[in-house]
Image: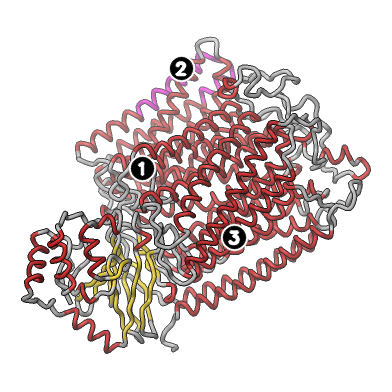
């Protein structure tokens, strides 16, 4: 029997991709198709963001490793690896929050100009997805303790695809928002 | 007429009539076959089991090819007609700038510097370039007899060439939903022979004539004291304030309120008395004028030739 | 190793309001049939509300310079009419029929995700309710169903109507997305073993393709909507040209959703027609593979045609040409379908039931709507006719003459399946003929009104030559449609009061949903007939003339 949950998440992220494409298009549109100059880009700390980006990418790999351990029924290693995954995601989120606070002190807000609007909307919605992923990961982690181990098995495939998706979206965001302006 | 590259309405009607002919033939075939088959193959008995036909590739491919040929022919016509419209480079210098407001039209004649509102005059026999933009929401300029419509988009300049052969009045309407009074946002374009247009433009360029009439002066005073002046300019050379229509030479206009009402004292007094009653949601506030004030203001405005 | 719902006993009857714990079971149900029925009621309810709004507009427009309805009220009414009919009447009726029949038609006992199914329904409901709550908060949205920025921004839409519009649409959109996910996974994983993908009934196939259209289109709308909401609530500047935003960007987002949405509303309708016509003609559908393939072509092309809603905004001719070409191309697969439906009639044995009548009239009405749609691909013609009553006429020929006629055909066809009771044919024919008369009276002449220069969305008009008489005829037509709907409602009411008939397959239909008792028990299938062709029940009834064997 095919894994319905996996298929569901697969279609779901396909649909979500369109949502993020639209948000990225808005950002690119303002920068490249209007006279306005990007006011956010040069306030961003690219090297620091790159480090956090690496954390997020790394978390994808730890998640893959943890899945392997789960299917080998090595619960202990699974728990450790998924805990690392969660930790990496939290670090990423912390970086994001730090960035927001820093921009706020530079008086860059969502209502400052179109770049403020699209920067916070795009990264905000991405962070929201990271948060949802974090909740899902935490649930998997929690399930691995009690009598619900079966739920961890049932959920891991879907969560994994979703998490990779969140990762890949970030790579695009990172490219268009952080890298592209300095190229 | 070669130099007039695109006779707007002519080209559109020509294409549209080709389309109508083809569409009518297709529709006729669909109706005929649907009705004919329905009648011919109606149930004869409960027991009959018709022949089970699954498909007929030949018919399918013929139809696809035919449909492809027809639509692509139309595509070629479409592209040709579309490219017949002169491509107007952005930032070119227009003869006339029309700005949309909720809910009136402002016209600025670039060559003479004249500003007027709602009643728009143009010369015949001459290609004029109109620039469109909007001060608030999206409006759309459309005079059916002159062909295509053009949107007035805030933050964006659109251009259109207009060539009018015959003198007369051309009416149209705002064709993009722009809020409460979209329905009454009419357009009136008056085409004059070039000499008459020059005359009109000259008369508009002059300052409005003052009068020693007592009622007139009272009205003039009211126009300032009741703060009408903070929204309505009185000189045809002034672009500001841009809130209400420029009222220079107001009396020369046949209609007012974006061409929805005849410009006469009855309507004008009704408007001054209670703007919201005549045109709900209009931006004009109720100034709470008494009857003598209304009379004086109305008299004053009607003398602004 | 996964978590299952408890499958009920095969003989357990579907609960009604009177059995079991009555209403409570309906609120808590995850059964696809119950949810499907609720979708249909929801659609009917909002269809009536939207219809009443249409009547208010028609009455206001009967005579020139009428002041019955104030402009701001009229604008709220037409905004709500469009939004309601599209998101709360047509979407639910099509999704509802899908939710009810897709599992039955593929021999499954449930949807792939029953709880998600219930969630989707209730969130759609919530969206609808929120949209209508706006009336009590100072005013419904009044910026049109397309909510063009900057008119929909704070400065120009002062009431909270647009906020309710945004949130309402996001919620119903989530419902549609959930259902679409469910359809896609259900069709891929829940089919009875012998049923290959190329044996799917066309209604299922079209709903399946449609699911992907929904998955692609709604996120684009949602992205636009959240930006608008952030603009309105957090003072962002996405669509405010005065502060560097772009008014055109909203239109791109809206129509890149809006045009696929048109196909989202018509593809399942095509599916219904492709089910109904063969049954009453006693023939297999003509050119199954062409109908199925053309659906895929439509789905792909539908994402490349949105620009034809924007030819008048001043895009470059290159862009215009591209969108024009795509819009022409999409007419071809649509035309193929019409040819195939007519081909199905050829040498059939046609039964003129109400359902079949609606299907045949769909063919004629939809052809008019489809053809007038092609005229918008001709850019210069679009420049002239866009945003006039010609468009109003066109879109009603597609949505009402197309989708709604197909929905009626489907309801008359499947009503005995859902309830075990046949709708009265006599009342049905009255409904059908009155409706088609009223419909054409209302909308055919609106093409002419548009050519004469009457713009859309005007709350009143002046007495230009012919405008008054054409509008008056239009209103009379609307009244006739209104009466027809009254007959339809009466028909439903009277039929529901009757005792169920014993026949489980009154039309001798040939797809799997008719292999269960009517109405089906709580568990759909106890035993399934063998499935070797697209028409398993036909094979059972006509052993000597079996359908093409496909497995």
Q: Between C544 and B213, which is closer to the camera in this rendering? A: B213
Residue C477, relative to residue A50: is it above or below?
below
Q: Which residue is mark 2?
A: A80
Which numbered disc, 3 or 1, marks the residue that appears first in the sequence?
A: 1
Residue B191 picture quarter: bottom left
Residue A156 x, y percent position in the rendering: 54, 24
| Protein chain holding label 3 | C
Calculate the distance from the C-alpha at mark 2 to the C-alpha at mark 1: 55 Å
Q: Chain of mark 1?
A: C
The reply to whether discs 3 and 1 touch (Cβ–Cβ < 8 Å) is: no
Mark 3 crowd level (few <14, some 14–19, many ≥20, 10 Å Cα): many
Q: Nearer the viewer, mark 2 or mark 1?
A: 1
Magenta residues span A65-92
Is C29 in front, or is B127? C29
Q: Is residue B115 left or right of residue A60?
A: left
Q: Residue C441, which numbered label?
A: 3
Magenta span: chief secondary structure: helix
Which numbered marker is on residue A37? none
Of residues C148 and C141, the one nearer the viewer is: C141
Q: Residues within 10 Å of mark 1 (few under 14, many from 20)?
A: many
Residue under numbered circle 1: C139
The reply, left or right, for residue C322 in relation to residue C298 is left
Task: Please state the horizontal and vertical placement of residue C286, each as a whole percent of the image.
Answer: 78, 54
Are the residues under badges 3 and 1 in a single subunit? yes
Classify residue B152 as left or right of residue C254. Answer: left
Rounded to the nearest whole Å, what is the CA distance between mark 3 and mark 2?
Answer: 72 Å
Do the residues at pointers 3 and 2 share their chain?
no
Which chain is disc 2 placed on? A
């Amino acid at each position: 029997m095919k894994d319905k949950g996996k298929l569901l998440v697969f279609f779901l992220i396909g649909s979500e991709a369109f949502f993020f494409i639209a948000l990225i298009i808005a950002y690119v549109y303002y920068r490249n198709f209007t006279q306005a100059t990007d006011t956010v880009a040069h306030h961003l700390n690219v090297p620091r963001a790159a480090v956090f980006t690496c954390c997020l990418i790394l978390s994808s790999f730890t998640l893959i490793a943890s899945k392997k351990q789960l299917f080998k029924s090595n619960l202990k290693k699974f728990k450790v690896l998924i805990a690392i995954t969660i930790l990496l995601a939290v670090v990423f989120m912390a970086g994001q929050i730090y960035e927001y606070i820093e921009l706020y002190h530079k008086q860059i807000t969502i209502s400052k100009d179109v770049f403020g609007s699209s920067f916070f909307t795009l990264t905000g919605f991405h962070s929201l997805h990271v948060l949802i992923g974090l909740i899902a990961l935490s649930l998997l982690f929690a399930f691995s303790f009690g009598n619900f181990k079966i739920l961890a098995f049932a959920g891991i495939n879907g969560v994994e695809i979703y998490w990779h998706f969140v990762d890949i979206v970030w790579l695009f965001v990172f490219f268009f928002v952080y890298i592209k302006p300095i190229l | 007429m070669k130099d007039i590259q695109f006779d707007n309405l002519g080209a559109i009607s020509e294409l549209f009539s080709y389309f109508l002919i083809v569409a009518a033939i297709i529709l006729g075939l669909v109706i005929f076959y649907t009705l004919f088959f329905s009648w011919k193959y109606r149930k004869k008995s409960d027991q009959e089991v018709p022949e089970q036909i699954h498909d007929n590739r030949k018919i399918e491919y013929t139809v696809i090819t035919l449909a492809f040929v027809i639509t692509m022919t139309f595509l070629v016509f479409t592209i040709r007609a579309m490219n017949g419209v002169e491509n107007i480079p952005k930032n070119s210098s227009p003869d006339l700038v029309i700005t949309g407001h909720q809910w009136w039209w402002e016209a600025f004649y670039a060559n003479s510097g004249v500003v007027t509102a709602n009643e728009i005059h143009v010369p015949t026999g001459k290609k004029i370039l109109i620039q469109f933009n909007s001060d608030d929401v999206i409006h759309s300029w459309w005079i059916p007899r002159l062909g295509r419509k053009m949107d007035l988009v805030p933050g964006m300049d659109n251009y259109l060439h207009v060539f009018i052969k015959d003198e007369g009045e051309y009416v149209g309407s705002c064709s993009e939903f722009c809020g409460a009074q979209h329905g009454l946002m009419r357009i009136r374009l008056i085409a004059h022979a070039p000499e008459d247009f020059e005359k009109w433009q000259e008369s508009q360029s002059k300052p409005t004539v003052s009068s020693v009439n007592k009622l007139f002066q009272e009205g003039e005073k009211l126009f300032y004291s009741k703060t009408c002046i903070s929204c309505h300019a009185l000189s045809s050379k002034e672009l500001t304030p841009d809130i209400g229509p420029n009222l220079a030479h107001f009396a020369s206009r046949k209609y007012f309120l974006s061409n929805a009402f005849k410009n006469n004292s009855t309507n004008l007094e009704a408007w001054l008395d209670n703007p919201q009653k005549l045109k709900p949601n209009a931006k004009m506030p109720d100034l709470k004028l008494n009857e003598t004030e209304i009379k004086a203001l109305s008299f004053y405005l009607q003398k602004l030739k | 190793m996964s978590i299952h719902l408890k499958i009920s006993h095969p003989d357990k009857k579907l609960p009604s309001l009177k059995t079991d714990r009555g209403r409570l079971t309906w609120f808590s149900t995850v059964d696809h049939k119950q949810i499907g029925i609720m979708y249909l009621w929801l659609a009917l309810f909002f269809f009536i509300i939207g219809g009443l709004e249409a009547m208010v507009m028609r009455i206001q427009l009967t005579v020139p310079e009428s002041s019955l309805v104030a402009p701001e009220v009229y604008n709220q009414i037409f905004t709500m009419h469009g939004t309601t009919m599209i998101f709360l009447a047509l979407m639910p009726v099509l999704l509802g029929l899908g939710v009810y029949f897709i599992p039955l038609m593929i021999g499954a006992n449930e949807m792939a995700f029953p709880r998600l199914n219930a969630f989707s329904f209730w969130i759609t409901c919530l969206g609808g309710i929120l949209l209508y709550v706006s009336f009590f908060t100072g005013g419904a949205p009044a910026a049109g169903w397309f909510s063009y920025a900057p008119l929909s921004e704070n400065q120009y839409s002062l009431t909270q109507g647009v906020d309710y519009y945004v949130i309402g649409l996001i919620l119903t959109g989530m419902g549609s997305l959930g259902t679409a996910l469910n359809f896609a996974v259900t069709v891929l994983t829940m089919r009875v073993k012998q049923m290959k993908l190329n044996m799917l009934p066309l209604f299922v196939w079209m709903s399946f393709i449609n699911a992907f259209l929904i998955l692609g289109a709604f996120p684009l709308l949602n992205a636009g909507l959240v930006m608008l909401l952030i603009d309105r609530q957090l003072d962002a500047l996405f669509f405010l040209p005065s502060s560097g935003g772009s008014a055109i960007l909203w239109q791109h987002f809206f129509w890149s959703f809006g045009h696929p949405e048109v196909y989202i509303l018509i593809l399942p309708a095509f599916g219904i027609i492709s089910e109904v016509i063969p049954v009453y003609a006693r023939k297999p559908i003509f050119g199954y593979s062409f109908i199925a393939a053309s659906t895929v072509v439509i789905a792909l092309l539908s994402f490349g045609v949105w620009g034809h809603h924007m030819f008048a905004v001043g895009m470059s001719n290159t862009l215009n040409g591209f969108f024009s070409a795509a819009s022409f191309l999409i007419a071809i697969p649509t035309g193929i379908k019409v040819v195939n439906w007519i081909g199905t009639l050829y040498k059939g044995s046609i039964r003129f039931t109400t359902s079949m009548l609606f299907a045949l009239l769909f063919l004629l009405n939809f052809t008019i709507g489809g053809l007038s749609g092609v005229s918008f691909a001709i850019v210069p013609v679009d420049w002239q006719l866009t945003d006039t009553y010609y468009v109003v006429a066109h879109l009603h020929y597609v949505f009402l003459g197309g989708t709604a006629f197909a929905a009626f055909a489907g309801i008359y066809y499947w009503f005995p399946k859902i309830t075990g009771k046949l709708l009265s044919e006599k009342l049905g024919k009255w409904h059908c003929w009155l409706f088609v008369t009223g419909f054409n009276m209302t909308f055919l002449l609106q093409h002419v009104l548009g050519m004469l220069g009457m713009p859309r969305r005007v709350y009143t008009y002046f007495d230009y030559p012919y405008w008054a008489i054409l509008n008056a005829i239009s209103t009379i037509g609307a009244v006739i449609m209104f009466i027809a709907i009254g007959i339809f409602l009466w028909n439903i009411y009277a039929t529901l009061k009757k005792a169920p008939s014993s026949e489980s397959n009154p039309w001798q239909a040939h797809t799997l949903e008719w292999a269960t008792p009517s109405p089906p028990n709580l568990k759909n299938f106890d035993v399934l007939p063998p499935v070797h062709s697209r028409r398993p029940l036909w094979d059972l009834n006509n052993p000597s003339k079996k359908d093409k064997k496909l497995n």
